[in-house]
Image (cartoon, rainbow, N blue to C red):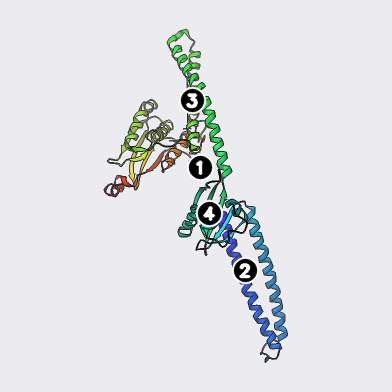
């Protein structure tokens, strides 16, 4: 339910308005001709050309056609009204002065008004919420606007409001009730939160026991058969994987349910990139991958939570090394990019197929399950995206299969922290 509905309804309405205009003006013209003919019959001199009888016939035929057209128009207008109610979204048309011209039943129900009571009122009066009015105003001025509005006083009521300026006059608003969707999302997040929480303690215990067992087996040397030592080693690795998955699930559930607030501080993103890279250097060395850091000098601080942003760097660097071959290089850096900082992690690894690039930030998505088995949970990028977006930034990937991938995330610089001199040199640093 989106722009298509607005465009569809708008085009129908424009077509009907034009048809109505034609039908009405045609009807008026016929009335005028008809009354002229009646005058002529009452004694006015006969005009040259077709007889009054012929003209009357023609007028009769035209009048019947106009009546059929009016009927068809009425039928279509009713269909339009029916369709508008059938789609289950609120549809409101405002004039350029933001006065309600048309509103379907669903719009009245969503806003909690008597059917028909919105027409003729200002958007503010009719919709009763300045945020919806602001979305309509923005659409009128800029062409389109969208926003989610949670209604106060009405537990859980929430709408996504999409607004578009009509191609001729006025603004169309579509209100979609997302209260149930948000409720289900909250329940799902709470369920995952509870489940992961319950699993965490026993898994930590199993992890510690396995670790001890592995150490004992190592110490026992040949007293324990090699096969058994190998199995204990595998047990340790898999327990580590489960433990990582549970803690990532818990993280994701908390972030998604909004239950985890960011503790904002001034963060030196460049220093964080260097620290995170250093922490993963031993892992990269084991994989035969070289790590390089490239941080621009004199970068302003950003507002953020260092631990969380460090987690994003760690996820990206870990992936970059994991999906790269021996002898390749991974570069990590931060630069100024207009009014934001852009951080990147670039590898020369296997790359990501174009069809998968749009999906890798979804939870549990793995581009190649066979290749990424043994370690990956498919949650790291979903968590990273949430963290970055929670800081007001964005994350994206550019990748070519067989050549490598570059993950870039941006974090806005607080307005007061952008000295003009630094901002002016941003292009040079890039
Ligand atoms: P995982 O734990 O599987 O690494 P992520 O959410 O971090 O989970 O990544 C999701 C998937 O995206 C990975 O399984 C992999 O298919 C793909 N991917 C992520 N980073 C890279 C990379 N640098 N190169 C190639 N593929 C990657």
- Residue that badge 3 annotates: 243
- Between disc 3 and disc 2, whose residue precedes? 2
Quadrant of the rendered image containing residue 406: top left
For the point 47% across and 23% down, the residue is 240
* Contact between labelled residues 4 and 2, with CB atoms less than 8 Å apart: no
Tell me if residue 319 comes above or below residue 425 in the rendering: above
- Per the image, the residue denoted by label 2 is 20
- Residue 401 visible in the picture: no
Which sits in the foreground, 180 or 340? Answer: 180
SS for tag 4?
loop
Residue 154 visible in the shown view: yes
Check disc 1 and report the residue beneath it.
355
Q: Is residue 3 left or right of residue 335?
A: right
Mark 1 and mark 2 in contact? Answer it, CB < 8 Å: no
Mark seen at residue 128: 4
Q: Earlier in the sequence, mark 4 or mark 3?
A: 4
């Amino acid at each position: 339910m989106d722009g298509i509905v607005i465009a569809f309804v708008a085009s129908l309405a424009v077509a009907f308005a034009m048809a109505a205009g034609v039908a009405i003006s045609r009807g008026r013209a016929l009335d005028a001709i008809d009354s002229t003919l009646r005058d002529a019959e009452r004694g006015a001199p006969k005009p040259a050309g077709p007889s009054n009888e012929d003209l009357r016939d023609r007028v009769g035929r035209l009048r019947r056609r106009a009546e059929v057209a009016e009927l068809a128009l009425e039928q279509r207008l009713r269909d339009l009204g029916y369709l508008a109610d059938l789609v289950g979204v609120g549809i409101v048309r405002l004039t350029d002065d933001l006065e309600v011209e048309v509103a379907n039943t669903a719009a009245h129900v969503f806003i909690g008004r008597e059917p028909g009571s919105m027409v003729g009122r200002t958007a503010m009066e009719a919709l009763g919420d300045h945020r919806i009015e602001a979305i309509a105003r923005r659409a009128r001025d800029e062409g389109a606007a969208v926003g989610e509005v949670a209604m106060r006083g009405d537990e859980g009521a929430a709408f996504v409001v999409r607004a578009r300026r009509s191609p001729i006059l006025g603004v169309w608003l579509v209100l979609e009730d997302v209260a149930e969707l948000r409720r289900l999302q909250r329940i799902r997040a709470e369920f995952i939160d509870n489940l992961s929480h319950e699993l965490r303690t026993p898994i930590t215990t199993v992890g510690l026991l396995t670790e001890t067992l592995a150490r004992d087996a190592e110490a026992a040397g040949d007293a324990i058969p090699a096969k058994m030592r190998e199995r204990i080693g595998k047990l340790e690795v898999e327990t580590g994987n489960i433990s990582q998955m549970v803690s990532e699930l818990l993280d994701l559930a908390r972030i998604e349910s909004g239950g985890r607030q960011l503790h904002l501080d001034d963060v030196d993103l460049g220093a964080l990139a260097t620290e995170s890279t250093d922490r993963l250097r031993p892992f990269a060395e084991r994989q035969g991958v070289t790590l390089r850091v490239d941080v621009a000098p004199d970068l302003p601080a950003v507002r953020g939570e260092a631990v969380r942003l460090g987690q994003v760097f760690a996820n990206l660097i870990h992936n970059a090394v994991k999906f790269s071959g021996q002898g390749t290089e991974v570069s990590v850096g931060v630069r100024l990019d207009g009014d934001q900082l852009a951080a990147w992690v670039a590898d020369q690894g296997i790359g990501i197929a174009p069809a998968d690039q749009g999906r890798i930030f979804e939870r549990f998505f793995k581009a190649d399950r066979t290749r990424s088995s043994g370690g990956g949970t498919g949650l790291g990028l979903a968590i990273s995206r949430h963290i970055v977006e929670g800081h007001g930034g964005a994350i994206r990937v550019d990748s070519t299969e067989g050549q490598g991938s570059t993950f870039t995330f941006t974090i806005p610089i607080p307005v007061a922290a952008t000295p003009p001199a630094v901002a002016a040199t941003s292009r040079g640093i890039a």
